[in-house]
Image (spheres, helix red, strand yellow):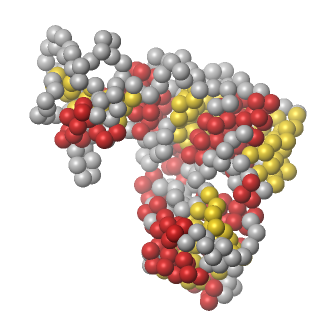
């Protein structure tokens, strides 16, 4: 592919099938294959440059930076670098510095993806916003997102994931956020990340990386003790949010409208603002409050915030539909942790109908596995008329439900989602409202697919 004069990279990818005209392809080894084997395919799909860290056979030029380079080719080419991933990160960091725009970093155990979507939509009323798509929140996805920065963007909203200490610091070194949001601290990925204290220290890397006040702003959940203590770990100004008047921005009069969203009153600087949102469930007010906090610091007025919230489409992964037999299905099947499942159960409790909980194992909880499943099952016994459990971890909790005086005959256990779907597609009926939730690895989508076939 011939290169234009002053060719500009317009994006990046690690999957040759996703290469587009003007993009950078980064050849990384995968679990089943190696990106170095697909460099020419990426060029065929429009990529103009590839980063590789070993010699390859290619129909396009290959430049080794360890050798003298006199001139660049006039066609798509590869560059051999010591480490392709590190090179991607360095390129992304350099490209981000070309843009004098505010960057908002978001982290936390639960709610960071929802907060990213809510904040992006909220800011979209006034700004052109770049966000990381899907789960591009790690050391690969975030740099690839930044390669899409262009002069049209006015704000970047970046979700930041965490598995090991130093990961969020790396993401901050690359993206240079001025505003940092921390949603909460929980046991998500504790199997890899460690105990709650280790997780909190990892998440705190975001607020530690913020510039000093007044440029830097840490937006912290006042109601979470781990997050609240992060105020001592940042040089940025601290802006707190929560459900009590101890926070700078707080909410009360929260009224769930079921599938229609929520209404609440926000309080800030001695004034009150009645607001409504399409976000479902009382727990979603936390996502809204921290997003409003960021919007205020980026110069949005309360009028603009109100209008933006009123005109937002539903942004959550959670959706409601009816099965053919008339049962209302709450599809929150994408993933699960104790915190998010308890929040989902609270939302189920706000809906009409006979409550059914369909819960798949929560994975990667490490030392919190037994405790987490017991907490969720205890909550379910307080809300549900009957309980369907899926997976070996929940099987271990069955006796606990009986201990809590929940009728044993109202609890069904299945080995996997596929087996459960056969039963549920024939038994759920009108008048029932069923929550479907479990870790992604439990394939709870099979239950949704079975119920939707009949809807």
Which quadrant of the structure image shows residue 50? Answer: top left
- Residue ID at (61%, 73%): 324
| Residue 289 locus on image (x, y percent) | 72, 41
> Residue 388: which quarter of the image?
bottom right
Compare residues 310 and 368 and report the one nearer the observer: 310
Residue drawn at x 14%, y 14% is 68
Residue situated in front as seen by the camera: 178 or 207: 178
Looking at this view, name the residue that lies furthest to the left: 57
Pick the residue in front: 78 or 158: 78
**Residue 397 in view (yes/no):** no
Tell me how many marks there are.
0
Image quadrant holding the C terminus, namely bottom right
The residue that appears at 39% across and 25% down in the rendered structure is: 10
Q: Give the x, y percent position of residue 103.
A: 56, 27
In the image, taking residue 75 as reference, residue 266 lies left or right, namely right
Give above or below for 185 relative to 233: below
| Position in image of residue 246 (x %, y %) | 80, 42
| Quadrant in the picture for residue 203 | top right
**Which image quarter is the N terminus in?**
top left
* Residue at 76%, 30% in the rendered image: 304
* Residue 400: x %, y % from top left: 60, 81
Q: Is residue 6 visible?
A: yes
Left or right: residue 39 versus residue 375 is left
- Apparent side of residue 176 relative to residue 279 in the rendered image (left or right): left
Query: Looking at the picture, does residue 392 appear above or below residue 270?
Result: below
Nearest the viewer among 329 and 160 is 329
């Amino acid at each position: 592919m011939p290169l234009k004069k002053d060719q500009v990279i317009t994006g990046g990818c690690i999957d040759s099938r996703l290469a587009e005209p003007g993009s950078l392809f980064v050849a990384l080894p995968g679990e089943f294959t190696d990106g170095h084997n697909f460099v020419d395919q990426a060029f065929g799909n429009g990529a103009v440059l590839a980063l590789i860290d070993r010699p390859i056979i290619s129909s396009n030029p290959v430049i080794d930076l360890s050798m003298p380079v006199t001139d660049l080719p006039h066609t798509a080419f590869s560059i051999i670098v010591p480490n392709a991933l590190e090179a991607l990160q360095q390129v992304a960091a350099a490209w981000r510095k070309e843009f004098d725009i505010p960057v908002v970093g978001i982290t936390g155990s639960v709610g960071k993806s929802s907060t990213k979507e809510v904040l992006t939509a909220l800011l979209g009323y006034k700004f052109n916003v770049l966000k990381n798509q899907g789960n591009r929140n790690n050391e690969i996805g975030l740099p690839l997102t930044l390669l899409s920065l262009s002069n049209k963007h006015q704000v970047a909203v970046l979700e930041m994931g965490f598995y090991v200490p130093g990961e969020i610091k790396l993401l901050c070194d690359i993206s240079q956020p001025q505003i940092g949001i921390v949603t909460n601290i929980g046991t998500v990925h504790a199997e890899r990340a460690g105990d709650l204290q280790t997780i909190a220290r990892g998440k705190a890397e975001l607020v530690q990386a913020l510039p000093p006040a007044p440029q830097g702003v840490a937006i912290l959940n006042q109601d979470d003790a781990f997050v609240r203590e992060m105020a001592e770990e940042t040089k940025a100004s601290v802006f707190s949010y929560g459900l009590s008047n101890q926070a700078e921005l707080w909410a009360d009069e929260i009224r769930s409208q079921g599938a229609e969203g929520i209404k609440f009153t926000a309080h800030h600087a001695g004034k009150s603002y009645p607001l409504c949102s399409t976000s479902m469930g009382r727990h979603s007010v936390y996502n809204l409050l921290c997003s409003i906090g960021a919007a205020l610091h980026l110069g949005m007025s309360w009028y603009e915030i109100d209008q933006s919230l009123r005109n937002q489409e539903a942004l959550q992964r959670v959706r409601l539909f009816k099965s053919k037999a008339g049962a209302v299905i709450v599809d929150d099947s994408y993933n699960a942790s104790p915190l998010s499942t308890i929040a989902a159960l609270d939302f189920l409790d706000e809906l009409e109908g006979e409550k059914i909980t369909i819960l798949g194992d929560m994975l990667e909880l490490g030392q919190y596995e037994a405790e987490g499943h017991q907490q969720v099952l205890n909550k379910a016994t307080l809300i549900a008329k009957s309980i369907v459990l899926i997976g070996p971890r929940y099987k271990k909790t069955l006796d606990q439900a009986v201990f809590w005086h929940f009728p044993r005959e109202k609890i069904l256990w299945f080995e996997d989602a596929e087996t459960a779907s056969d039963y549920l597609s024939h038994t759920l009926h009108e008048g029932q409202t069923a929550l479907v939730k479990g870790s992604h690895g439990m394939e709870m989508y099979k239950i949704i697919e079975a119920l939707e076939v009949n809807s």
